[in-house]
Image: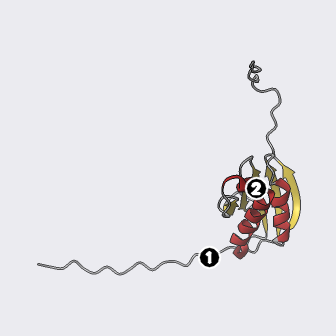
Amino acid sequence: MTTPPVQKPKARKKKIKRTVPKARVCITAGENNTMVTITDLEGNVLGWASSGSAGFEGTRKSTPYAAKVAAETAAEKVRSYGIESVNIEVKGLGPGREQAIRGLQSAGYDLDQIIDRTPVPHGGCRPPRRRRV
């Protein structure tokens, strides 16, 4: 009976963290949650956080304070990339819009521009008929 040959463990390459001086922050402010995603200018995600992932549950997720904490958490996750200034894109009409921006300011980022990308219907589908009770 022969024993199988012992395999050497593969040497892992050390992942090099790149520096990103300028980034884009996408804030999606929904009715029940606020999501903050930080990407480079090409759109590759560097880090993200949401009110739910920041530890809030239920109706507390939809508060402005939860959005501020989520923005600070996302900023802390990408601290190692060396981001200095950010472009902010806000989408949605939720309660955490302005507070998420304030959370990024308190994290120490320079805000270059704030763009509102909230989808607004023009025309669109016919609304449902009025309820008769």
Which residue does the numbered mark 1 point to in the structure image? 16
User: Is residue 34 in sight in this rendering?
Assistant: no
The way the protein has been coloured in the rendering is: secondary structure
Where residue 11 sits, quadrant-wise, is: bottom left
**Residue 13 % position (x, y):** 52, 77
- Residue at the spot 80% in from the left edge and 54% down from the top edge: 96
- Residue at the spot 35% in from the left edge and 81% down from the top edge: 8
Three-letter code for the amino acid on which mark 1 is drawn: Ile
Q: Nearer the viewer, residue 80 or 34?
A: 34
Three-letter code for the amino acid on which mark 2 is drawn: Cys
- Residue at the spot 87% in from the left edge and 55% down from the top edge: 114
Q: Is residue 50 above or below residue 77?
A: above
**Residue 101 % position (x, y):** 84, 60
User: Is residue 4 in sight in this rendering?
Assistant: yes
Which residue does the numbered mark 2 point to in the structure image? 26
Q: CA distance from mark 1 to mark 2?
A: 25 Å
Q: Give the quarter of the figure containing the N terminus.
A: bottom left
